[in-house]
Image (cartoon, rainbow, N blue to C red):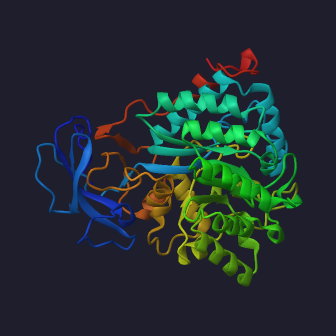
Amino acid sequence: MQSIPEHAFTTDRPTTLRRARSPVAFLPEVVGVAPDRDGAALVDIAIADGRVASVAPAGSGPALPGDVDLGGRHLWPTLVDVHAHLDKGHIVERTPNPDGTHFGALTATAEDRTRFWRRDDLIRRMEFGLACAEAHGVSAIRTHLDSQEEQGPETWAAFGEVSVAWKNRVALQAVALAPMDIFRGPYAEQLADIVAETGGLMGGVTRATGSRIEDGLADLDALLDRLFALASDRDLDVDLHVDETNYAAGATLPDIARATIRNGYEGRVTCGHCCSLALQDEATLAEHVRLVRDAGISIVTLPTVNMYLQDRQAGRTPRWRGVTPVTELRAAGVRVAVAGDNCRDPFYAYGDHDMLDTFRQGVKILHLDHPYGDAAALAGPAPAAIMGLSDHGAIRPGAPASFIVMNAWSMDQVLARPQSDRIVVRNGRRLAGGLPSYATLVAAEPGRPTEHAAA
């Protein structure tokens, strides 16, 4: 196989990337291509001034001075992580989950938040996470931020600083995350103002403070209506954590769908997790999927984290995957995205803010193969549309020339290896520097004994 020339992605001169292979899901404006068995096609991509000038079937792109023949390698747009937790990330070593369960994660995170979540700690960990994401080829992230009354103002202020520092590197959005009972009190108004000032989204998790989701909320409809009223008054979209449990009988997703319609918020709501949807009987599932579709709700599945948390019991092998029924939702016309969720925190002890890895695992976990079809849309066009970002998640004229180039010529090769030798291109130039060292994070971590600090 022909190697990529040394000069590729190192100059600003106009270039045509010849015979780049990309899933057609990433090529919304290209006509006349012949997809291969994986749903990918060979294209020529012309680049000028750091942006995509044209995308055409292979062999028909313009001849330019810096042409590079990729020889059929997979080239993807930089990817979009529509559900992350940058404020929680990288605390697992100082405050581990005691038993790996969801409730254990809640307890450990609350402890760490109370002890350590101050400006410098938040900014250091958020920026470390962003540096990892950028190096892996992620160009946009929506992060949920813990926004309880005692924490919210400080976290949102820190996020505001990070957003300014990273505005030309990773597109950022933030969502207010807190138990729904905050909408019973006056703090909800203050939080909504903070969110509006930052250009974020209203959100929450459908349980009460200190309780489990299966405990339920007798006044959920009223709390949802107040959330929507606060959002509507400030023209804010909504993104909720929903039914992250195996308690199918107490699913709150249909309540959210009805509240969305009741408040005229169709097309402006995203729901993440929705795990218990997979445990409903077929008739109930079909009914709830129709409700979600009619409400125009987008769904985000978090396969790696929910396989880690759901159905975990000591001394027992888990019996179910903990992920939402993606195939049924997509078949009904519901927009679905896959996302990374937590990273090295009590909710998920692993991860590296790598959406390509999330996609690779998601395909296997969710059986989005044989054939692959348009599965790649879940990591690019779908989350970009949810975030309202037309310049991300696809390869189209006018978009930034920001790509992930792999030494893989078929989708099974993309999935078989971690692609640790990928080339990340941003605005037409190869990204330099690589992944940040854990040493830069750990050495300054509060509460860590000096003898364990990295040199």
Identity of the residue drawn at 84% across and 51% down: 208
Quarter of the image with the C terminus in it = top right
Q: In the image, is 134 to the left or to the right of 292?
A: left
Q: In the rendering, at what x and y percent does residue 138 appear?
A: 47, 45
Q: Nearer the viewer, residue 323 or 330?
A: 330
Residue 248: image location, x then y, percent: 80, 70
Is residue 289 shown to the viewer in this render?
yes
Q: Residue at x 63, y 71 (%)?
A: 292
Residue 299 location, x and y as percent? 60, 63
Q: Nearer the viewer, residue 440 or 212?
A: 212
- Outermost residue on the front side: it is 233
Work out whether residue 196 or residue 374 is closer to the camera in this orientation and state it: 196
Left or right relative to 427: residue 167: right
Question: Above or below — where is 430 with respect to 316?
Answer: above
Taking the spot 21% from the left edge, 36% from the top edge, the residue there is 12
Residue 159: name its quadrant. Answer: top right
Question: Would you say 277 lies left or right of 332 here?
Answer: right
How far from the left and from the top, in percent, is residue 92?
73, 36
Q: For this view, does 319 lie left or right of residue 194? A: right
Q: Can residue 125 be seen here? A: no
Task: Specify the quadrant that holds the N terminus.
Answer: bottom left
Q: Residue at x 65, y 36 (%)?
A: 87
Vertical relation: 237 (above or below) 133: below
**Displayed quadrant of residue 45:** bottom left
Q: Is residue 53 above or below residue 35?
A: above
